[in-house]
Image: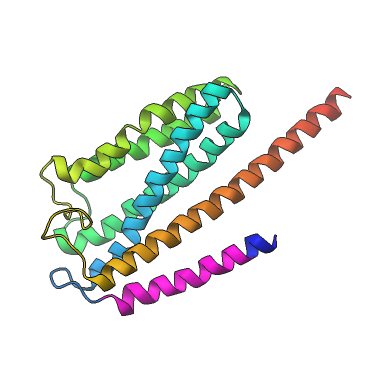
Amino acid sequence: MRINNLTLGLIAAGMVAALYLAFLYAPTEAMMGDVQRIFYFHVPMAWVAFLAFGVVFAGSVLYLWKGEERWDRLAYAAAHLGVIFTSLNVVTGILWAKPIWGTWWVWDPRLTTTTVLWIIYIAYLVVHNAAETGRGSHFAAVFGIVGFVDVPVVYMSIRWWRTMHPAPVIAGGSDSGLAPSMLFTLLFSVGLFTLFFVYLLRQSLSLSHLEAEVERLSQEERGG
C-alpha cells in the first residue's frame, strides 16, 4: 500500500510538472500556435496505447502457449487500458485537428488505421466477455495476436502514405526535429504516462486476482 501511495504521489506530481512543461516551459510552435501544446499529451497517449497492445500480444501468446490464466488476465487488463488510451488519443487528436484542419475528422490514413485498431480491441473485449469461460479467452487471444499487426501499420501510416497528419518529429527527417525544450517536454510526458500505465496495469491485475480468489472461494463453498 505504501508503494502504491508513493507511486500515485509521484504520478500526481509528475502530472503537475508535465502541465508546467507543456504550457509554460516549452515555446509556442511557430505555425500552429498554442493548440500544438496538445501534442505533449496526444503522443504519449498513443505510445501507451501501443505499449498496452504489445502487452496484449505478449500475454495472448503466453496464454495460448502455456494455458495459464495469469497471462489471460494480463492481456485482458492491458486491452482495457489500450482501448482507453486509444480513445483519449483520438479525442485529443480531434481537438487538435479542428483549429488546424478546419474540421474535426477526416479519413486520413493515420486516423483510419487508428480507428481500425480501436475496433479490433473493442472486439477483443467483447469476444472475451461474450464466449464461454476458457473458449472466450482463447478466441480473444487470437484477436490479441492478429490485431497487433495493425500497430506497426498505424505507426508507419504517415511514412507510407500521403497524409494530413503532421510528419514524425523523431527520426522523421531534417525538417521535423524538435527544439531541445520541446523534446525534453515530450520525453518527460512519455515517461510519465508510461509509469501511469504500469501503475494502472498493476492495480487492474491486483483487482483481477482478488476477483478470481473470491470466485474460487465461492465455488468451494458451494461445493462444500
x then y, percent, for residue 188: 38, 66
x then y, percent, for residue 50: 37, 44
Residue most extreme to the bottom: 24
Residue most extreme to the right: 224
Give the main secondary structure, helix, strand or loop, of the magenta stretch: helix
Left or right relative to 20: residue 198: right
x then y, percent, for residue 218: 80, 32
Q: Which of 37 and 61 is in front in this view?
A: 61
Span shown in magenta:
6-26
Q: Nearer the viewer, residue 127 or 193?
A: 193
Quadrant in which the C terminus appears: top right
Total labels: the figure holds 0
The structure residue drawn at horizontal position 37% and vertical position 27%, both measured from the top left corner, is 146
Left or right relative to 84: residue 135: right
Q: Is residue 175 above or below residue 83?
A: below
Asked if residue 62 is among those painted magenta in the image, a careful observer would answer no
Q: Quadrant of residue 182?
A: bottom left
The structure residue drawn at horizontal position 18% and vertical position 47%, both measured from the top left corner, is 106
